[in-house]
Every structure is written in structure tokens, then in C-alpha cells.
Amino acid sequence: MAKESLTEAQERIETLKTLLNRYSYEYYVLDKPSISDKEYDQQYHELEKLEKAHPELITNDSPTQRIGGTILPGFTKVQHDSPMLSLGNAFNQEDLLQFHQRISKLTGQPLQYICELKIDGLAVSLKYENGLFTQGATRGDGNTGEDITQNLRTVKAIPLRLNEPLTFEVRGECYMPKASFVQLNADRDEKGLEIFANPRNAAAGSLRQLDSSIAASRNLSIYLYSATNFEQLAVETQDALLNRLAQVGLRTNPERRLFDSIEEVWAFTEEIAAKRKDLPYEIDGIVIKVNAFAAQEEIGYTVKAPRWAIAYKFKAEEAETIVRDIEWTV
Ligand code: NMN
């Protein structure tokens, strides 16, 4: 009898974990919930209750296990699978043209570019083993970062389990949405605590906490944009890679575009600069990449950065305007 009920509990726990992880994905990654909060909360509490009765059945990918509850004595170092490179910068149309001419000379081929928004947060790397989120780290010096797994587990948009049993490292930008930043500073101000200068500092400060319950209270999100070891994904372009990452359950920014000329890329930077203040997150530029991986390999790398990509940076004054705009909406 006891054995049977244990099997039943195990089956129900598995069902609830799968359902809740899917609802959480729809809610936090797709922004498209398929059930009400009330129904979600009911199932979450049912899972909590079952796990309390059968603690031996609690697994790491359970939605109830996002917050570890232990306070770390310090952060340990993590070696990245391959270096997290930085990007060269462009500050105006001339710089972009030069970038285009430089790399066009290296391949005889016409180039297609993919433009992605450069989110102003903290670059992080996530390791998945057989589809399970096992380790998260800061960029650090590019080769070695700090292990912030406990804090990243609290970021609801990071799936604890992917839809496919992949083993790889994905990279992206963890950030604080503008609305969360405004709310956080208002709360801190009320409590007489020092306010954060901008969402980037607030996100970085949250991820450097040794107590993961602080990060959990900060409402962070993430966009993923690259992966190591991606041969297994059978993709040949950055655009296809982003689509695959989204397919396995990772959050990617839909605000990306493909262009066949650098003039169109420039027009896109102007279009985004104009609507920058209306975006729900801060950006400090546009990342422009050669879309085809074969062309990227042909163009190659300098010691520090890929030659096939560049970060177009918006002017600093505009960034200050954004921060003021946010303050005005409090
Ligand atoms: O801490 P979690 O489990 O993510 O929940 C926080 C809040 O977000 C809860 O109030 C919950 O109802 C809501 N939520 C709703 C859905 C849904 O599908 N309606 C999914 C995840 C979280």
C-alpha cells in the first residue's frame, strides 16, 4: 500500500513539474500564459505539499527548488568552455562602413548581417548537461568567471530543464527590466537605502549577492544569444541558432533583423535609437554580426574579439536621458 502511494506520488510529482515548468516557460519566456495565476498557484501548492510529504522525491529541476536557501561563503571560479570574447566598437556610420569594407575584403562573398539589440546588463554563461541547468557564471575576464549558479537559478526566465537533453554552454545578457528597476529604487528610497544608478548596476549588484533570496526578490530576466558546442544543433547561421535556442526553451530577443547591406544596418541603428526609450529594457547599442557561420570562420578573429562582429554604441548623453525618463515615470 505504502509502496503504491509512493509510486502515485512520484508520478503526480513528475506530472506537476512538467506542467509547472511549461506554464513558467509560457509566462516568463513567451509572455503568453495559458492558465490563470490561480490555477498555477494551486498546482504549485499541490507540488509543494507532495514534496513535503516525500522529500526524497525532490529534484533539482523542480520549480520549488529555485531558491537554495543557503548563503554562500564566497563565489568560486569557473573556467569557461571557450573564452567569452569582447566586441570591437563602432560609434558612427563611418565606423560601420569601415567594418563592412574591412571584412568584405576578407571574403569575396556578399555578406548578410544580423542585428541584435545590445542589452545593458551583465554577460553570463549557462551550462546545461543533458538538458539540465547545472552551472551559471559571470563573464569575468573572459576566460574565468564567478560561479553565480544559485542566483541565476532564481531568474524565472532561465529554464531549469530544456526541451531537449542538450549538453552545452549558452551565453546571454542577464538584465533588470526598466519597470523592475523603477520599483526597486522606489522601495529602496522609501526604506532609506541607497538607490541604484541604473538597471545595469542593479542587475550586477543582485547577481553578486551571496544570499540567493536577494537575487530572487529582484525580478531579473535574460536574453540568450550564443552557444558553444553548437554543432549538435545543426544550424548554419546566427539567425537559425537563435531560433533553435528559442525552440529548446531559452529566451531570445525577437527584436532582431537580417540585412543584405550595411546601409540598411545603419538605418536600423537609427530606427532603434528613435524607439530606444520605449523599450522595456535598457540597451546601449546594436550588435552587428555576419549571419553565416561559414563566412564568420573565413573572416576569423583577432586575439580579443571576432572580426565578423561589431558593437555599434549609442551616444552616452542618450543613456542619461533614458535614466531620467525612468525616474520621471515613478
Ligand atoms: O515564483 P513563481 O512560481 O514563478 O510565481 C510567481 C507568480 O507568478 C505567482 O503569483 C504565479 O501565479 C505567477 N505565475 C503564473 C504563471 C501562469 O502560467 N499563469 C506561471 C508562472 C508564474
Image (cartoon, rainbow, N blue to C red):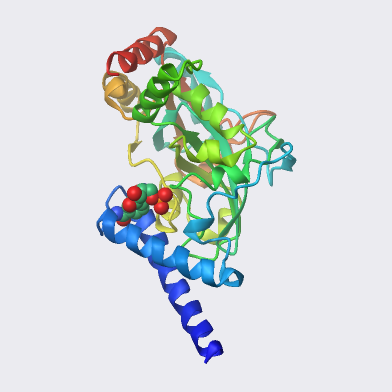
**Coordinates of residue 101 in the picture (x, y in percent):** 48, 23
Q: Is residue 230 above or below residue 79?
A: below
Q: Nearer the viewer, residue 65 or 108?
A: 65
**Coordinates of residue 46 in the picture (x, y in percent):** 40, 67
**Coordinates of residue 191 in the picture (x, y in percent):** 45, 20
Q: Is residue 209 above or below residue 89?
A: below
Q: Residue at x 44, y 47 (%)?
A: 156
Q: Quadrant of the C terminus?
A: top left
Q: Nearer the viewer, residue 148 or 276?
A: 148
- Res 105 seen here: no
Q: Residue at x 68, y 43 (%)?
A: 82
Q: Nearer the viewer, residue 272 or 176?
A: 176
- Res 152 seen here: yes
Examine the image and state in which quarter residue 150 appears. Answer: top right
**Residue at the extreme bottom:** 1
Residue 97 placement, left or right of 107: left
